[in-house]
Image (cartoon, grey):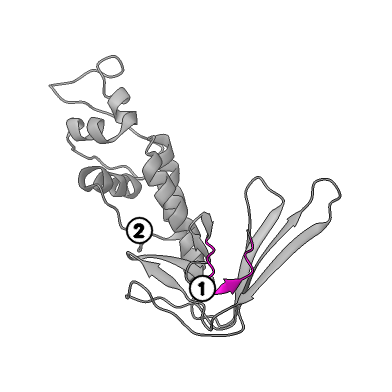
Amino acid sequence: KEPVIDTFRVHSAILCARCPYFQVALSNNWIKKDDDKFTFAKPNIFPKTFEVILRYLYGGTINLDRQGSSDLILLLEASDELCLNELCEYIQDCIITKPLKKHCYYKGPTIVVAKIKGKQELIGGYNPMYWTTSELPYSSSRTKNGFIFSAKRNDDNFQEEATVARIKYDYSHFTAYRGYPYLSFGFNNLSFHGRECHVRFSQSLCFFPRIK
């Protein structure tokens, strides 16, 4: 992307195999070879952004820990243009997770509230301690004062219906699974994974009554 311009020499076979956009763009119907090589310009993608995408296309994995918020937005735009749907979803989850780390971890008591897409419903919980990261697959902080809740609006009479579940046993915890952090109340009674919210209920788990 001008004014920053760079040249990449890559294998067209790998690009076509890994990226639907290049599978079409590098076909003989779209672009012609010059001296047995394709010359292809992407003036709307910054070189450093394209370099990250190339590493993903070649290696099948990507590490976004060192990418800033503006870099992630540029990467998301480029991935969307190149029809890399799986990468787009991963970047969107990362964009949500980064501020979660910044604003929630080690900040003391926290209330988490989320709106269910397409519904007049809120869901969330209160952690009276603090969220923490851990290298262990499961780590927990014990408390008796947390709760989770669900509140929804009835379309007929617009009256709020709310359910609050209190701790049945004396813990609620944060869980890190396979290196991907997410917030969890109880033993995954209520957990937030990027853009997704999961509710799990069992008589043997931490919060009662069930909220959904």
Q: Is 197 situated above or below 86? A: below
Q: Is the stretch drawn in magenta largely helix, strand or loop?
A: loop
Q: Name the residue rendered at 20%, 31% in the picture.
A: 12
Front one among 55 and 127: 127
Helix, strand or loop at label 1? It is loop
Note whether residue 112 is visible: no
Question: Where is residue 132 shown, x and y percent of the image?
Answer: 45, 78
Q: Name the residue rendered at 77%, 59% in the picture.
A: 161
| Amino acid, disc 1 | Gly
Question: Where is residue 74 shown, x and y percent of the image?
Answer: 43, 48
Looking at the rendered structure, which numbered label has been put on residue 111? Answer: none
Residue linked to disc 2:
64
Query: Based on the displayed image, in which of its 4 quarters is residue 134 positioned?
Result: bottom left
Q: Name the residue rendered at 79%, 50% in the picture.
A: 154
In the image, residue 2 lies in the stretch drawn in magenta: no
**In what quadrant of the picture does the N terminus appear?**
top left
Helix, strand or loop at label 2? It is loop
Residue linked to disc 1:
186
Front one among 166 and 34: 166
Q: Is 186 situated above or below 193? A: below
| Amino acid, disc 2 | Leu
What is the residue that sits farthest to the right in this orientation?
157
Question: Where is residue 183 shown, x and y percent of the image?
Answer: 49, 68
What is the residue that sits farthest to the front in this orientation?
203
Front one among 137 and 211: 211
